Amino acid sequence: MTADALAGRRRWRKPPFIASPYWRYGLYAAAVGYLFLAVADVDLNWSRMVAGLDRGGAFIGGFLAPDFVTRWNDISRGLLESLTMTVVSTIIGVLISIPVALGAARNLAPTPVYYLCRGIITISRAFQEVIIAIVFVAMFGFGPFAGVVTLAFATIGFMAKLLAEDIEDVSRDQVEAVRATGSSWLQMLNYSIQPQVAARFVGLSLYRLDINFRESAVIGIVGAGGIGATLNTAVARYEYDSAAAILMTIIGIVLIVEYSSGAIRRRFL
Amino acid sequence: MPVAEIAGRRVWQRRDAREKLGLWLVWLVCVSIAVVCWQYISNQTIWMFVLDAPEQAFDMASRMSNPRWAYLEVIAKPLWDTINIATLGTLLGVAIATPVAFLAAHNTTPSRAFVRPVALAVIVASRSINSLIWALLLVLMLGPGLLAGIIAIGLRSIGFIGKLLYEAIEEIDERQVEAIRATGAGSAQRLAFGVAPQIMPAFAGISVYRWDINIREATILGLVGAGGIGIQLQASVNSLAWNQVSVIFLAILATVVVSEWVSARVRHAII
């Protein structure tokens, strides 16, 4: 500051993001310390990486010349399994998530029901789909049924949480108005809550359909059916051209699902 | 307002005849798809195994219900690895996603005809491949270990962070950029003093939110060999040591709850 004053001009400085200097420098020091520890934790095996370069090259080569033909039977079966799993699990999950969402909305549910439903949502959201798949595969055996149960279970947490937040945001006036006609609780739901959340409900369901397809492509890695199992086999056998074909198919379908669900959502919302 | 004549009385109805027909057709199509899909799944399922599921579940629950707490010592290091994978992976994702977001936002991109579609394609590509698949491929190339996990998480995060960040950039108040421009600032100065301060809260919020998601994702990467607690989980499941699995589940649950709390607190403080 004195130097600036001597030079006869004051310079403006950008205000820092964190105002208190103690917090600012404390956080910087903590971040640097953590980064140091974390980077030291990463073990680098250079010779293994050099050996991996060939495989990386082979894999990129596989992408340039994907082989859809040799394993087409496995690919089409895995794909059909993934798609059917996606549809069935989304429907089951969405159907179960409706009552859970009603219970988890503070403005509709009594307190014990509210906490019960919030608990269901928390458990469903805490674990990654693949971890849930491991448990259900152990329970139901290998195959798409375990995958359907896994995805349906994960759908409940996602849908119920977002839908409950939406129900909590509805306008009280319409509920009041329908109630004033002497409607029952179900009629109140059907004529005042449902019209207000329907558009968002359709949007969320389609979004979840999209997510469920993406997840159905991986839970096969732990044995829960779908294209993930095919991909895992192809990679384990070092068949990079088939693996590339499977990945390209997954990406293609994800894009189709995403664009079509976007188009449907635009029509409804 | 559709009103129908029923037995000489005028009754209000929510939809007219055409709307009803359309709705009915949509339902018909949806239900048929559902039935066909269910039939396929049912044919692929060995119902014998499903029928004894309650027995299996009971057995599993009884084995899990006495957790082997001594196992906590073994999983402390993998848990630390998992957190590091998530954090370093998020940093990598942020480092790549930030320039991509600036290239993708229509008010900061250098070229709307060419650069913007490329940046959007990067964002979509990153989002369409799950981090477990990224990890599967990277383990193949880099060998098993943390590095493959970190890169997998980083590549997967680009799409999420990039998408939310470029939307935030597009929503900024252009007048502030204009004001900076009026002082004679160059394009880098306009970004630093006009755009960056406006998106800083969104940027920090998005990064912390993604970090929270990445903790969850990092717990499974070990299943394909990319480091973290997933390796221990896989080993315990394969050896049917369900009393170790329950310890791992509780450890994951605790980590996820803590990370969610941290992320919620930070976002609350910023936004």
Image: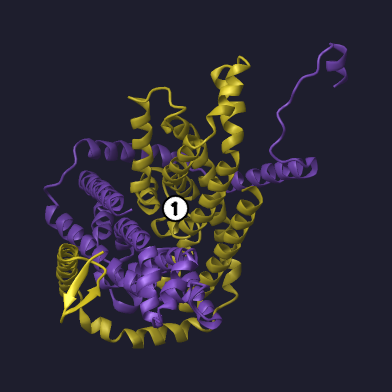
Can you identify the residue that label 1 sits on? B226
Q: Chain of mark 1?
A: B
Task: Residue at 67% x, 44% y: name it.
Answer: A31
Task: Specify the amino acid type for callout 1.
Answer: Ala
Q: Quadrant of residue A174?
A: bottom left
Tint applied to chain A in the drawing: purple
- What residue is shown at x 57% (from left), y 47% (from top)? B205
Q: Position of residue A200 (x, y in %)?
A: 37, 59
**What secondary structure is found at the residue carrying circle 1?**
loop
The one of A10 and B243 positioned closer to us in this rendering: A10
What color scheme is it? by chain
- Residue extending farthest front: B8
Which residue sits at x=36%, y=69%? A194
User: Taking A99 as reference, is B169 above or below it?
Assistant: above
Residue B265 locus on image (x, y percent): 64, 56
Q: Is residue B44 above or below residue B87?
A: below
Is residue A43 something that shows in the picture? no
Say if residue B129 shows up in the picture.
Answer: yes
Q: Classify residue A195 by image quadrant.
A: bottom left
